[in-house]
Amino acid sequence: MAAPRFSALPAAALKRVPLGGLEAIYHVSSGITHLLAEPVPDLLDALARLEPGRFVTAAQVLALVAERFDIVGDDPGEAPEAVVSERLSELGALGLVTIVTDA
Amino acid sequence: MRHSCSITVGPARFRIGSDWRAPVDQLRALYQDYPQDEGVPDFTVRLQATSSIRRLIKPQVAIAGDFTLPDAAPLPLEQGLLAAEMAMNLQMALGWRRHLLLHASAVSRNGRAVIMTGVSGAGKSTLSALLGERGWRFLGDEFVLLDPDTGMIAPFPRPVSLKNTAIAAMEREVDDESRFGPVMHDTPKGTIRHLRPRTEAVELMTRETRPALLLFPRFGYPRAVRRVDEAESFVRLTQASTNYVALGERGFDALTGFVRAMSACAIDYADGEEGVEMVERLWSEQGGKVGERAAAA
């Protein structure tokens, strides 16, 4: 199966406010508030810096945030891009990023 | 309804109708300092008999009005005043949309407010009542009304609902018996007695105040102070708000702006005296400074 690819929502879809080390995110269309810890807001930032509508793989997102984060999984054997993919998939399930999986 | 009165508290006007005279007379006495002019009410409350025979024999007061809870148990007529207070709270909690409502008490000094929030029994009512007798302006013991557009607090200085041991504590503090309502025993929350705020608090209830210090008090524990960060304050206040979800984006903007402008602490205190002293100390250390920052923002 092809790896999923991820894209940011339109800028107006989310309101984001840093609160200390966490970030409160209001999802405008659902009216739900989320409170996220790093590096998750940085993953959203990385996607948001790309041109609108562009989809990228977890490995590409990892490259975008690698300067700031040394991402490791709970299991030392887990590949960093798998960790990023899991976090982005969770964000997708919350409706905070868009996911496509090519056939 | 056979009997009725109108009461304005802060920005909200209530019309209370009743099948019996006694609760209305008690309300008029307890709210004697408040505007009682008739006009278009924001909310209507009705205290009505559970059946026609129950108006006269072992009368039971059922709460009705614009907003009701389907399974609310009726109260005996002797607790009719409590039924009216509960009904007014319910209207605010379920129906008010002009402000973000926080289940909290508040007092102010020099135009800046201390907000105190916590679960029922944490002591926020008693602490605000004590401070209200000791040089602070009492803003409310039940709801804090945060204006989403300005970030200001609209006072809502209802009579303080004193419960159990807090009754004797405030009877020692206030030597004016006329400010107290009737003692109501065996209510769902034990013994309850209402205390009308000082006249100045009512006279100034249309004057908004800028929030400066957020406290999470806990009564009956050894003295302790802990800083509370913005994220924890935010989560606890979403839980303490009755209309955060209903306000949507306005609620999010209001609450994130609020917690970012505040200095916040959790305080544990053993008794009322210690609580007052801790609030005074935190205010002198942090409240004024934070208030200036919030005012400049």
Image (tube, helix red, strand yellow):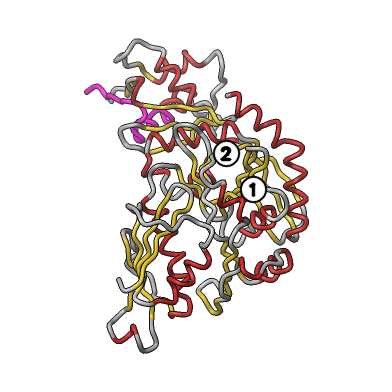
Asked where in the image residue B15 lies, by quadrant, the reply is bottom left
Among all residues in the image, which is located at the extreme left?
A103
Residue tagged by mark 1?
B137
B2 relative to A17 in the view: left or right: left
Q: How far is mark 1 from mark 2, CA to CA?
A: 10 Å
Binning the other alpha carbons within 10 Å of mark 1 as few (below 14), some (14 to 19) or many (20 upward) gives many
Q: Quadrant of the N terminus of chain B?
A: bottom left
Q: Residue at x 46, y 64 (%)?
A: B85
- Depth order, front residue of B181/B246: B181
Q: Position of residue B186 (x, y in %)?
A: 54, 79
| Residue with the most extreme front position | B37
Q: What residue type is disc 1 on?
A: Arg
- Which mark is drawn over residue B209? 2
Residue B248 is inside the magenta segment: no
- Number of marks drawn: 2
Q: Position of residue B21 (x, y in %)?
A: 40, 76
Image vertical order of residue B8 relative to residue A56, above or below = below
Looking at the image, residue B106 lies above or below residue A77: below
| Front in this rendered view, residue A65 or B184 | B184
| Along the line of sight, the residue nearer the viewer: B238 or A1 | B238
Q: Amino acid at mark 2?
A: Thr
Q: Residue at x 59, y 31 (%)?
A: B261
Q: Residues within 10 Å of mark 2 (few under 14, many from 20)?
A: many
Span colored in magenta: A86-103
Q: Residue at x 69, y 71 (%)?
A: B168
Per the image, label 2 sits on a secondary structure element best described as loop
Which residue lies at the image location 47% right of the left edge and 66% below the top edge? B28
Please identify the quadrant where the C terminus of chain B is shown. top right
Dot 1 and dot 2 residues touching (CB under 8 Å): yes
Q: Chain of mark 2?
A: B
